[in-house]
Image (spheres, rainbow, N blue to C red):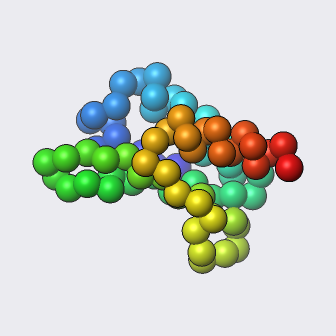
Amino acid sequence: MTISTSFKRFWPADRLERLKALHTAARKAGIRLIARNGGDRRIFLAYFAFRKEGGDREVVSFWDLDQAEQWFQQELRR
């Protein structure tokens, strides 16, 4: 996963590592994680969406990394 410049610019290293770990785990589970800036050049709003591999539709989306991690953990327990 390529982390966008906006994440690298506004997020501390520990959050970037959490994002990388979440992406790796999601990919192993057959779920695609999309992380992007939902704001604009002046405002950074982290946006996360999960999609099932091979599908075009979003399964779920979040504005918060903690919520995205919690959803993914619950999804793994199913």
Percent x, y for residue 11? 34, 31
Q: Residue furthest bottom?
A: 56
Q: Residue furthest right?
A: 78
Q: Residue furthest left?
A: 42
Percent x, y for residue 17? 51, 29
Q: Would you place residue 17 above or below residue 75 in this image? A: above
Percent x, y for residue 44? 26, 45
- Left or right, 39 with reference to 14: left
- Residue drawn at x 46%, y 28% is 15
- Left or right, 42 with reference to 56: left
Q: Quadrant of residue 68?
A: top right
Q: Quadrant of residue 13?
A: top left
Is residue 24 visible in this depiction of the protein?
no
- Residue drawn at x 34%, y 40% is 7
Percent x, y for residue 24? 65, 43
Q: Would you place residue 12 above or below residue 2 in this image? A: above
Is residue 6 visible in this depiction of the protein?
yes
- Residue drawn at x 26%, y 35% is 9
- Give the tally of numbered discs: 0
